[in-house]
Image (cartoon, rainbow, N blue to C red):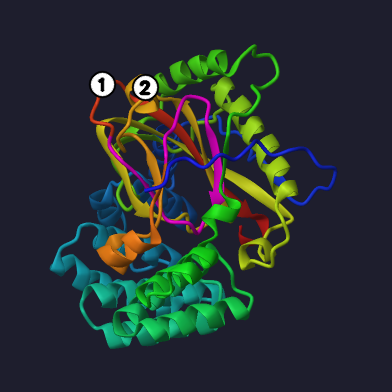
Amino acid sequence: MSTQPSIAAPGIEPETRLSLEIPMLKMLTSKEELSLALTAYTRAPESHELRHRLAAQLLAADRFDEVIALLEERKDLSSRTLNLLSSALLARETHLDDERALVIAEHAVQLSQDQKERALTVTELAKVVTRLGDLQRAEELLQQALNLQPSEKDAYKRLFQLKLQRSREEALVFAQDTIAAGVCHSRVLGSAPLALALLGRIDEARAAEGSHQFAASFDPEPPPGWDSLKQFNDALTAEALNHPDARFNRYGVASAQTWRLDEPALQRTKCFQQLQKLIQRETERYARTLPDTGHPWLQAMPQSAVLRNWTVIVEGDGYETWHVHQNGWMSGVYYIHVQDHIAQGSGNGGCIAFGLPDAVVGADAAAAFGETLVRPHSGLMMLFPSHIFHRTYPHHGSGRRICYAFDIIPSREL
C-alpha cells in the first residue's frame, strides 16, 4: 500500500481553461423548504407542479411512505412524477413493492414526452426489471435508453455491469467504444479500468484510471480576512456542528453511519460561503496546470461548470464505501477538522483510499492494482477526476472528523 503522494499546490498560470460558477445561495434549509412545500400543496392540492415538488422533497428526505401515500392513488401523474413513485417503492426493498414499481415504471414509459424523458423512464424501468431478475429484458431496455440518450449515466452504469458479469472482454469493448464515440462521463471513464484489471492488464488499468497523473493534494492559502487556515477551520467547524440542516445517514449514497449537510452553504452560513470561493479559486487554478496528455478525461474538460457541495461528519464508526462521483468531471474534498489520532496515526483509520473495489474486480485484481492511502489533516484539500474509485475507513476514535466534499459539474449537463 502506497502512502500519500507528494504533490505541490498548483501554480498560477494566465490561461483560463475552466470557469467554475458558485450556485445561488439558498435562504432556507431543506427541512424549511419541505415544510413550505407541504403548506403550498395543502392550499392547492390539485396543482401538478406543487405535488411533484413535494414528492421530490419527500423522496430526498427518505420519507418514502409519504411519497407513496401522496402519489399512489392519483390517476393524473406525469412520467417524471411516476418516476418518483417508482423510486420510493424500490427504496422500501420488498418484492411486493418491486412488483408495484414495475406497473408504475411501465406506465411512465408510455407517458414520456421526448427522447430525454423517455431515456430516463426506460432506465428506471430497467432498474425495476433488474431487481425482479429479468436480466435479458433489462439489458434490452438499457440499450434502448442509450440509443435515445447516449450520455444517460445510469443506463450506461447498469448496462456495463450486466456486460461485465457475462464477459470481461465484451465489457471492455463496450467501454472503449463509448469513449471513442465521445461519451466520457465518469461512469464510462471509471468502467474501463475495472474491465482491464479483471483481464489482468494492470498497467493499462492504471493508465486508464489516471489517479497518479491527475490527483492533487495540498494545503491552500486561507481566504481573505483570515490569518491562518487553523483560524478559518475552527470557525468552519463551529458552523458545521451548529448547522440547522444536519441529517443522519441517507438512502442510496456511499456514506454509512455519518451525519450529512446536503446544502452547507446557506445565506446564513458565512464561513461556508468563503469556503466555496476558496474551492472555486483553487479548482480553476489547478485546471490551468493540467498537462495535455491526450487522456479522455482531459478531453472532456468543460469550459464552464457549476459547484455542487456537501459536508460529511463522521464519528468513530462512520465511513464511505467504494464509489465514484457520477455527475462530476472533477471532484474533491477539503478537510475542515481531523482529530490528532487520525492525522498522526499509522494505520488506515480515518484515511481516504483510492483503488478498485474488490467486490467488483476481486481481491487479487484489486491488490494487484494497488491502493493509494492518503492521511488527512485539517486544512488538506484534494482534487481528483470524478471517475476514480475511492473510499474512507472508520477512525474508531473519539470526536468527529469533518470534511467538505464537492463535484465540478459541467454546465452542459445541467
Disc 2 and disc 1 in contact, CB within 8 angstroms: yes
Compute the Cα span from label 2 to label 1.
8 Å
Q: Report x, y in % for residue 68.
A: 26, 57
- Horizontally, residue 240 falls left or right of residue 125, namely right
Task: Give me the residue at 53% from left, 76% from top.
Answer: 113
Residue behind mark 2: 339
The amino acid marked with disc number 1 is Ser
Which residues are drawn in magenta? 374-394
**Res. 114 in view:** no
The amino acid marked with disc number 2 is Gln
In the image, residue 175 lies in the stretch drawn in magenta: no
Q: Report x, y in % for residue 16.
A: 80, 48
In the image, residue 387 lies in the stretch drawn in magenta: yes
Q: Nearer the viewer, residue 350 or 224?
A: 350
Q: Nearer the viewer, residue 254 or 202?
A: 202
- Horizontally, residue 379 falls left or right of residue 281, namely left
Q: Secondary structure at mark 1?
A: loop
Number of other residues with Cα within 10 Å of mark 2, as a class: few under 14, some 14 to 19, many 20 or more: some
Q: Report x, y in % for residue 194.
A: 40, 69
**Res. 394 in view:** yes
Task: Give me the residue at 20% from left, 57% from top.
Answer: 92
Number of numbered discs visible in the structure rendering: 2
Task: Give me the residue at 32% from left, 72% from top.
Answer: 127
Q: Secondary structure at mark 2?
A: loop
Number of other residues with Cα within 10 Å of mark 1, as a class: few under 14, some 14 to 19, many 20 or more: few
Task: Give me the residue at 47% from left, 72% from top.
Answer: 192
Would you identify the image quadrant in which residue 122 lies? bottom left
- Number of the label disc, if any, that sits on residue 398: 1
- Horizontally, residue 240 falls left or right of residue 212, namely left
Q: Nearer the viewer, residue 344 or 279?
A: 344
